[in-house]
Image: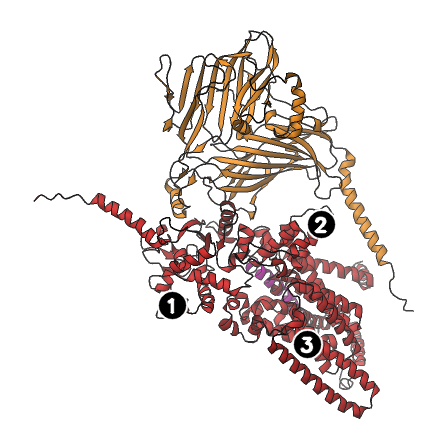
Chain colours: A red, B orange
Amino acid sequence: MSANSLQVLAAAGKGESTRTALRVIILCLIAAAAVSSRLFSVIRFESIIHEFDPWFNFRATKYLVANGFYKFWDWFDDRTWHPLGRVTGGTLYPGLMVTSGVIYHALRALTIPVDIRNICVLLAPAFSGLTAFAAYLLTNEMTTSNSAGLLAAAFMGIAPGYISRSVAGSYDNEAIAIFLLVFTFYLWIKALKLGSMLWGALCALFYGYMVASWGGYAFITCLLPLHALVLICMGRYSTRLYVAYCTWYALGTLASMQIPFVGFLPVKTSEHMPALGLFGFLQLLAFLDYVRSALPSRQYQTFLWLFAGGTFGLGLAGLVIATSAGIIAPWGGRFYSLWDTSYAKIHIPIIASVSEHQPTAWPAFFFDLNFLIWLFPAGVYLCFQQLADEHVFIVVYALFGSYFAGVMVRLMLTLTPVVCVAAAIAISTVLDTYLDARSPDPENAKAEEAVEGATKKASKSGLKSTTKPLVGIYSYVSKGVVVTAMTLYLLLFVLHCTWVTSNAYSSPSVVLASKLADGSQHIIDDYREAYQWLRQNTKDDAKIMSWWDYGYQIGGMADRPTLVDNNTWNNTHIATVGKAMSSSEEVSYPIMRQHEVDYVLVVFGALLGYSGDDINKFLWMVRIAEGIWPDEVKEREFFTPRGEYRVDDQASETMKNSLMYKMSYYNYNSLFPPGQAQDRVRQVRLPEVGPTLNVLDEAFTSENWIIRIYKVKDLDNLGRDHASAAAFDRGLKKKRAAKKRAPRVLRVE
Amino acid sequence: MSESPCDHDSPMWTPCNEDVNSLLCRSFPGDASYRELREEHLAPEAPVHIHAPQVFKNANLVHVISVEKNYVKESINVVIENIDKAAQDEYFIPFTADQVSRLGGVEVKDRKDATAGPFTAEVAEFDPTSDTQYLRIQLPTPLKSGAQQTLGINYYLLKAYKPLPAAIAQDEPQFLAYSFSAYAPSVYTTSKQKTEVKFPSTSIPDYTKLPGSGDIKEFPQKQGSKLTYGPFDEKPAGAVEPVEVRFEFTKPVTHISLLERDIEVSHWGGNVAFEERYTLYHRGANLSALFNRVKWSQSQYYNPNTYAIKELKFPLKVGSADAYYTDVIGNVSTSRFRSNKREALLEIKPRYPIFGGWKYPFTIGWNSDAKNFLRKLSGGGYVLNVPFLEGPKQVEGVEYEQALIRVVLPEGAENVKYYTTIPPSSISEVEVQTHKTFLDTIGRPAIVFKARNLVDDFRDRELVVTYDYPLSATLRKPLIVFASMMALFVSAWALGSVDLKFSSK
């Protein structure tokens, strides 16, 4: 009975349509798992946009939905970068917003009116499901094993390296870009394999979408020519490569130039030169190919050398001249920092100040990829074994992806897909080998194995295996051990992914969670408290000065104009804010007046022990300001003579007089008994007498003091400077008190 | 005063047997169509210009002004006497144009005869540009010549106070000032009258003193938290004696400029969903210095009495569930919701304490089982009975300048009728709109009530809506979803079976 049903099941499992159905179901389940594992923060907190950049994307999406596409395209935003403004429509990657807008309108058309916020929050998880599918397709191009694709999809779905940028609410360009990256690679492989212009055009189409979505498109722009170059160097030039590459390059470049932010960069900047160069090189090769078919081989040799040398020399000279003449822009700062990790720290502090631009620590690889990281080399090795054109791609991608992931934390993201693919190839090879042909009858199994071994041998044209006994796993023990171990690793991987996602990547960072004494969750919502206060109780065009980290959030949540934001397009403007923050009141006040600042916002964590506050970021402000005004702001002066960065009574005078220090600790003393003021982030006791502020008034402080907002005082009515006005006010009070207290002494004599 | 407008004994029903659209064609007084309509009605009495005809005399009048809450509740109890030869049925009360814009919740009843109803009271538009406007009270039966009738007229004035001083420190007590006339507003000669003012506390530092009459030397007389001006002897029509009082009110002056209240009925879900969007202002004294967190957190320990809004309490109907509290930037975590068999109390705290002049818009919402509000009639129709207003219940009161109440019925509901116990003069417009939302094809009927100048005294007034909901409308949605899915599959199959390739054979 049971055997009968098993047979039925087995028979059902063998049918092609059943397998397809199973595959579809499994892929759907994987997509569901990918989506649901990203919902921690929605369930724990709420449907909210996370962190910083997503707030801008969200605001831009709302603008797009409210004003339509053309207005969005021409959007000049005068509420950021006051007083400069920002040509937002021309300086952003519109792919993400347009995607959300299209989804929004499509759902409306289907009479499912979903709030735009929810679409934005859930876009990244939804696209992660698609990414898993794309990984499945890509892997299927690499191997004949059916399981590898499904494994790759599963890995891609839950690998923390990808989850880190795609949890619900992290509405960033990467949310859709990784899907586009993997899918473009799949289409490239497909185009290359088939030599098909159709697939090449599709590849170009998705490449164009990718360019519209993320600055990381340069990774594709460099990787595809590199792959092509490696193939050519391996002597694998073919018309397939020619068709695929030329179709992709011509159409893709045209597509990418439609994005205003990219514009003519593809023909101007060094990052895009490899692709252009290879395009030319391929034309030469095609030409040579033609010449070879027309010329005798000896003449051809000479011709080849002369021609190749001449072309290369000309090309190189042209490139150098064009670069030095300024026609082609040299490599950008972010690219230099990819080659020399200390470059940014010295030359462009604004790039170095972002934590995700730091070099990756080794444990991060294990943290983000778990056991995939050690299966990764095995997978690459397996690719070497077969080394068809598509395997070369994996090898090249693996090499470059690893390098970039090593120099910059956020580029772990581009490594993750290839790790998933390679690891899936490795695991499926192991499982296919060790799970093969298990049947209740050992003799049968042996026979089957023997048959399979024979076919394998036959398919291999090598000689060494002909004399050797049949290769296969005979022992059930080894099969059992390996399979059990692999299952265990897979289960551990799932556990690890869940744990990492839940603990490391699911915090909205706008809202902080803490536990009360009774174990219940307490939400610290200071950011939104202050932003809402700004939004409701200041005038609509009140300019807010804060460090650039909070620019997007202020624009998104408080809806007020800001001086600088996370776009960081104008280093000088940021340095101006840095200078205002790091100078003394007398220096800062004119700067703030000149920029029409109404309120200054600082983040202060000392009361709560919130370490991401402005005092801890202060040195970056100083460094960035120093980059522009080396004579006026000096980093050294913010340290004690012994070279320590302190905020207590040992702090340097410059530090104590800086506006940032004063704003942070102003009035903080009065919260504590005299002399007991404590900074819980830096674990020091503060000076007994707190700083005085003359040019600013405290306007609002949030419940846990995380956000402090100051109002910039107007000019003094009597034309005094603020310090003397404040001193006069204080002095007057003292005098009055003294008058009252001192009894009049009558001179008697 | 025992008669408060909340009394249920004389329900002001608006029976609606005809089409809802044509029923209450009230719109805002400035509305052109409304004016046209009124002029048509007024055509026969066109000679009436500014002054109402002197056909009545106020034999005795008691004017009670209550400033206990952050709106003014006034009630005029007056014995009117017809001094004309003919029977009269229209009684007028004058208001300034400014007062009329802030006037709400007018209810009139006969103090002697509870069954004598309904008295309709509405603003009579003689001359929209004049500063003097009139409230016309339509007596249900014309009063015969020489006969007397006792009217109890209740109304509310919103935005009535001004803080004095206008800016105070964070921890100081707040004082409000209110100006009114010691003589009750009237277009008729008043033989005898007095005005009583009730205060929230005995702390009344300033009030206008008037020379007394009779055996009382000086008005007003102060008894605890009450001031009494009068009794005065006969005063001519339109007599005014400006008086100002200033009293302590260390409580928030909560003003809701706009309340949007959505009530959505779902038959499939067996659910009634409520959502209310408030635009809240504090109309009290502004801060003289900027907000100081240290002072605030310290004052929370030793002197929690403040004029800042710290908390709002919404007693919801029993059985409410899934309450939420958000604002424009997301969920606000500082709320508590207690729901059990006896009560459902939603307590919310604003993100920051709201001081005078500050603004705080927010949204709350909750669900409730349909059976708590919805009943099936024996005739096949449904009757929905929900509160017209469910705002916060605060000791100091809450006033609503504009309220937009929208009842969204299931798709396909027809024959929609309603009535409400809210004073008809407060409702300025009712219309039935079509609201399109999830998976709707023809849209849902939504009755939209535009009401103005309401106060939280009207919290428990009912809103009853009856409608028919045929079976075909019930099945519309699942059938449409099913049909469209089928269409999708069929078209996918049809497309899939088209062979686009060149034959490989």
Residue type at mark 2 is Leu
Residue type at mark 3 is Leu
In 3D space, how far apart are the residues under numbered discs 1 and 3 (Cα atoms)? 48 Å
For the residue carrying disc 3, how many other residues have a C-alpha within 10 Å: few (<14), some (14-19), or many (20+)?
A: some
In the shown orientation, is residue A252 left or right of residue A50? Answer: right
Q: Earlier in the sequence, mark 1 or mark 3?
A: 3
In 3D space, how far apart are the residues under numbered discs 2 and 3 (Cα atoms)? 41 Å
Give B83 or A52, whichever is nearer the viewer. Answer: B83
What's the chain of the residue with tag 3? A
For the residue carrying disc 1, how many other residues have a C-alpha within 10 Å: few (<14), some (14-19), or many (20+)?
A: some
Residue A392, image quadrant: bottom right
Q: Is residue B440 visible?
A: yes
| Residue at the disc numbered 2 | A107
- Relative height, residue A64 to residue B379 (above, below): below
Residue B186: within the magenta? no
Please give the range of residues in magenta. A483-509
Q: Main secondary structure of the magenta part?
A: helix
Q: Earlier in the sequence, mark 2 or mark 1?
A: 2
| Residue at the disc numbered 3 | A226
Element under disc 1: helix
Residue furthest to the left in view is A749
| Residue at the disc numbered 1 | A637
In 3D space, how far apart are the residues under numbered discs 2 and 1 (Cα atoms)? 58 Å
